[in-house]
Image (cartoon, helix red, strand yellow):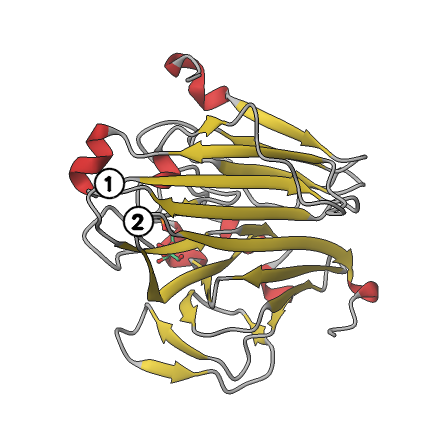
Amino acid sequence: ALPNLKNYPYCKINIYGLVPTCIVRLYGGQVTSWKNEQGDELLFVSSKAVFKSPGAIRGGIPICFPQFGTHGNLEKHGFARNRLWLVDDNPPPLPVNSGIKTYADLILKPSEEDLKIWPHRFEFRLRVALGPKGDLFLTSRIRNTNTDGKPFSFTFAYHTYFSVSDISEVRIEGLETMDYFDNLKGKERFTEQGDALVFESEIDKVYLDTPPKIAIIDHEKKRTFVLRKDGLPDAVVWNPWERRSKTILDFGDEEYKHMLCVEPAAVEKPITLKPGEEWKGRLELSAVPSSYYSGQ
Ligand code: TA6
């Protein structure tokens, strides 16, 4: 049942692994915390984040659906990130031998108001799970439940905010040589030339047809985030840097130093579903000591 609306910013589900934990909020269906065995927070959430309607929570893993960014007529990044999701009290079981012990399923369906701005019936099931070693698994299943026989198309992203010690000590492996669109430069298509990506100014790029595995290496923390994705060909990389940060109300002026968004996404080629069809987009995140990461 819907929780009392007055309390909804505070409605959250704690998912406990053996030691690692994760918090997912009903507001936005948004993961806002993921901790490792040492209790370190692995996701960035702004100290200025607002956890209630009408905006989205600045940090964690906002879900961009049914539209990524401004690629359409809807509000930026779609409406899923500022709607109240429901918890499925009786979720379908996990696949046998998944190794996962703790998970929660959240569901979003369009309200009558939503149907006025995006006239398509859907069921969005988001499964958030912790693996035995504390890995975080997100699985989105989106089904077209239209009864009028009409297909719909959407774009999508897991707008993941990683916590990093110092952005100038971070590099990304897996996107070198990829084609991309640069949101700071218009509609032209570029190709990345260098080695691993490093950061010294604002970045807002959509990398296209990226490999299923991307690594974020934090030299100072000696930690590597490994992202494995399925059904999500693109990857957006964003850091607002100093000047842009000052224009974002729910973001501290210096916080850009401690975050990096790497967002597994389906942006360039929208997904189309006929009635009854379902799409699945999966993200696996692990955080390992860099000494364990071989790059393979
Ligand atoms: O994913 C990158 C991006 O689209 C950037 O253009 C930047 O504006 C960011 O998302 C944050 O968007 P938001 O609507 O959450 O302020």
What's under tag 1, amino acid-wise? Thr
Q: Which residue is drawn at 33% across and 35% down?
A: 55
Residue 273 coordinates in the image, percent (x, y): 33, 55
What's under tag 2, amino acid-wise? Pro
Q: Which residue is drawn at 23% across and 35% down?
A: 114
Q: Is any atom of residue 46 visible in this view?
A: no
Q: Dot 1: within a 10 Å radius of its alpha carbon, few (fewer than 14), some, or many (20 or more) residues?
A: few
Q: Which residue is drawn at 55% across and 54% down?
A: 282
**Residue under numbered circle 2:** 275
Disc 2 + disc 1, Cβ < 8 Å: yes
Image quadrant holding the N terminus, namely: top left
Label 1's element? Answer: loop
Q: Is any atom of residue 172 visible in this view?
A: yes
Structural distance between the alpha carbons of marks 2 and 1: 7 Å
Residue 210 coordinates in the image, percent (x, y): 51, 73
Residue labelled 2 has its Cβ within 8 Å of some atom of ligand 1: no
Residue at the limit of the structure toward the bottom, as seen here: 193
Residue 96 coordinates in the image, percent (x, y): 73, 45
For the residue pair 276 and 67, the one nearer the viewer reads as 276
Image quadrant holding the C terminus, namely: bottom right
Residue 265 coordinates in the image, percent (x, y): 44, 60
**Residue under numbered circle 1:** 147
Q: Is residue 118 above or below residue 256?
A: above
Q: Is residue 43 above or below residue 192?
A: above
